[in-house]
Image: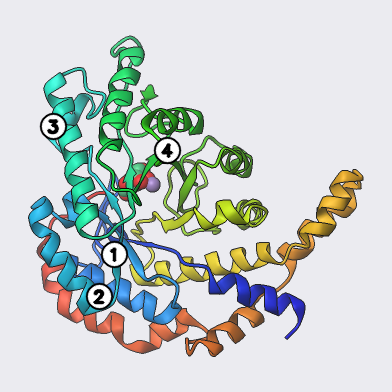
Amino acid sequence: MSQKEELVAQALDSFAIELPSWGFANTGTRFGKYVQPEAATSIEDKFADAAQVHTLTGVSPTMAIHVLWDLPAGLADVPVIQKLEKKYGIRTGSINPNFFERQEYKFGSLCNPDAGVRKTALQHLLDSIEIAKSLNSRDISLWLSDGSNYPGTQSIRKRIDWLMDSLVAAHTHLGSSQRMLVEYKPFEPAFYHTDIADWGMALLLARHAGPQAHVLVDTGHHYQSQNIEQIVVWLLREKILGGFHFNDRRYADDDLTIGSMDPYQVFRIFHELHCDPEGLKQTAFMIDQSHNLKGKLEAMVQTVSTAQELYAKAAIVDRDRLAELQDAALIVEAEECLREAFWYDVRPAINAWRRSKGLPEDPLAALRSSGYIERIRAERKAQNTNSTVSYA
Ligand code: PSV
Ligand code: MN
């Protein structure tokens, strides 16, 4: 094995990426809904689909769960999930409370000016922590749609205090090995201000909440051309990076497959993570994509494979040499050193790694020839054509 092949194999051995339950169900855009007959229609379907992706890729043993969508009865649904975990060999990953679908949340959840609504939202967060405890889930991943659409309509200042208070209160309920991940997003659905708009706000909130709170970076939640790897470096340096929601974007939160627009960006993020092995160990990789045009399973398999490729490329950067070149300000050589890893074709080494694990060399082709999609299409078709579409 060449040194590069060894580095690729080593990197892949410790790489895992979490699948989102919402990525398997039918979802819509604001304008149209294109129903996929094979989409998951129940939490059991989602577990089955996640298991299929994991069988083909070997690196996605956990599935993130959205509380309201997947556990409509809350804690009472935990035994259902536990049964499915056993049946399909997939563990529950991060628990995502839902702060945006109740009618009361029109003007916010944890930041709502109405103390009663804030209490309801906090209770939901505490229930989600209990759900996570019963399912042995480490991460409770928070994304709020809170914000406002027009200047002057809400007190940004008061809302910070309300949010801080809730996060501090919730933090005291975390189990000793649990984490609270704080996700930021600059806009949508709120268009004037969102209460956690960027990584600075998420960082301050997490710091204030307590030592088990970390920042979650969703790659789609940045302004155009923002340098995400620089944010990653800062968060790593502050030991507060908790994880990623991976997707790609061209305009905003487009939910495109990872690296489909800018693979070099994802490579640079992974490179910065490889530069900090301790930080890397603490960082959860999760997919946050919901596809309307691509087949849902195909998109997931494509995403997992692409993530592996970009992670492996970043693993073979000659970091010692790069550091020397940077220190000597040999800028062309330094840039070429980084680019050399990016352009190196890691696919043969990944194929060899897959062979050694008894996995198909081409998971996408294996999915297509497995007959799985045809089977679920036949089984779920009737229900999908009659069902309503949920949004994600
Ligand atoms: C919001 O855009 C978000 O990124 C949050 O992580 C949600 O939980 C997820 O998408 C829902 O699709
Ligand atoms: Mn997200």
Q: Say left or right for 208 vs 110.
A: right
Residue 211: image tag: 4
Q: Earlier in the sequence, mark 2 or mark 3?
A: 2
Does dot 4 land on a helix, a strand or a loop?
loop
Does dot 1 land on a helix, a strand or a loop?
loop
Does dot 3 land on a helix, a strand or a loop?
helix
The reply to whether discs 2 and 4 touch (Cβ–Cβ < 8 Å) is no
Q: Is residue 111 visible?
A: yes
- Above-or-below relation of 345 to 65: below
The reply to whether discs 3 and 1 touch (Cβ–Cβ < 8 Å) is no
- Residue 119: name its quadrant: top left
Q: Position of residue 18 (x, y in %)?
A: 39, 62
Which residue in the structure is indicated by mark 3? 120
Q: Tell me which amino acid carries mark 4.
A: Pro
Q: Earlier in the sequence, mark 2 or mark 4?
A: 2
- Nearest to viewer (mark 3 / mark 4): 4
Disc 3, ligand 1: is the CB inside 8 Å?
no
- Above-or-below relation of 24 to 240: below
Instruction: Report crowding for label 4: few under 14, some 14 to 19, many 20 or more residues within 10 A (C-alpha).
Output: few
- For the point 23% across and 27% down, the residue is 108
Q: Tell me which amino acid carries mark 3.
A: Thr
The residue most toward the front is: 176
- For the point 8% across and 52% down, the residue is 73
Q: Say left or right for 37 vs 229.
A: left
Q: Tell me which amino acid carries mark 1.
A: Phe
Instruction: Report crowding for label 3: few under 14, some 14 to 19, many 20 or more residues within 10 A (C-alpha).
Output: some
Q: Which quadrant does the N terminus fall into?
A: bottom right
- Above-or-below relation of 294 to 241: below
Q: Is residue 262 visible?
A: no
Q: Earlier in the sequence, mark 3 or mark 4?
A: 3
